[in-house]
Amino acid sequence: MTLFITAQREVSQLVMIDMQEKLANAMDKSEMSRVSKNCEILLQAARLLTIPTIVTEQYPKGLGHTTKYLVQHLQHTTCIEKTSFSCCEESTFNQKLTNDRRQLILVGMESHICILQTALALRKMGKEVFVVEDATISRDPNNKSNALKRLAHSGIIISNTESVLFEWLGNAEGENFKQISKLIR
């Protein structure tokens, strides 16, 4: 039996993984721009819809901090420093996971390393895990493609920015719809 799961704002947490300056410089510029824009849209929508957000930084001493482009959208959000590839190996990350938020929406870098390992660990913990493919990146597009296939075969939901946004909204009514619609124009 196949389960059809949609992102629901009442039970979602957004997780932005390692969107850091030095890592960003190693990525394809046009793809990095697109991924950054989609991360920005999701961060703004999460704030508007009061969806908790977790942000990680992989070894910031060596890889720098979250990109200036995105850090402006992280008011009241503390970046969790880590050295393990899976966020779930960091106790501070696990403390930020809330029991009433069973869905984790993952975005960031690199798809085939930190996102892959985090998604698989969260799935093992019984979470519903979404990877937003147009808000994730790897230095090599083939590595990203391979990771997305592995994740899909492991029960991870592969989605995209607009699907997540409109699943969170549920309908085309109200001020939230108007504001989020402006984000994607």
Image: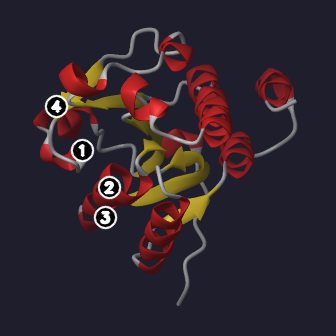
Q: Nearer the viewer, residue 47 or 36?
A: 36
Residue type for callout 2? Ile
CA gap between label 2 and label 4 equals 20 Å
Residue 113 is labelled as: 2
Q: Which mark is residue 120?
A: 3
Task: Report the residue marked by disc 4.
Answer: 92
Sequence-wise, the earlier of marks 1 and 3 is 1
Point out the tag, 1 or 2, that comes first from the N-terminus.
1
Query: Marks 3 and 1: in contact by CB < 8 Å?
Result: no
How busy is the neighbourhood of tag 3: few (under 14 within 10 Å), some, or many (20 plus)? many
- Residue 158, given in percent of the width and then of the height, sits at 56, 63
Q: Position of residue 30 (x, y in %)?
A: 68, 38
Q: CA distance from mark 2 to mark 3?
A: 11 Å
Label 1: few (<14), some (14–19) or many (≥20) C-alpha neighbours in 10 Å: many
SS of the residue at dot 1? helix
The residue beneath circle 1 is 87
What kind of residue is marked 1? Cys
**Mark nearer the N terminus (2 vs 3):** 2
CB contact under 8 Å: marks 4 and 1: no
Residue at image point 44% right, 29% down: 52
Considering only vertical position in the picture, is 114 above or below 184? below
> Amino acid under label 3?
Leu
* Residue beneath the point at 53% across and 47% down: 136
Q: Residue at x 53, y 40 (%)?
A: 10
Looking at the image, is 133 positioned above or below residue 124? above
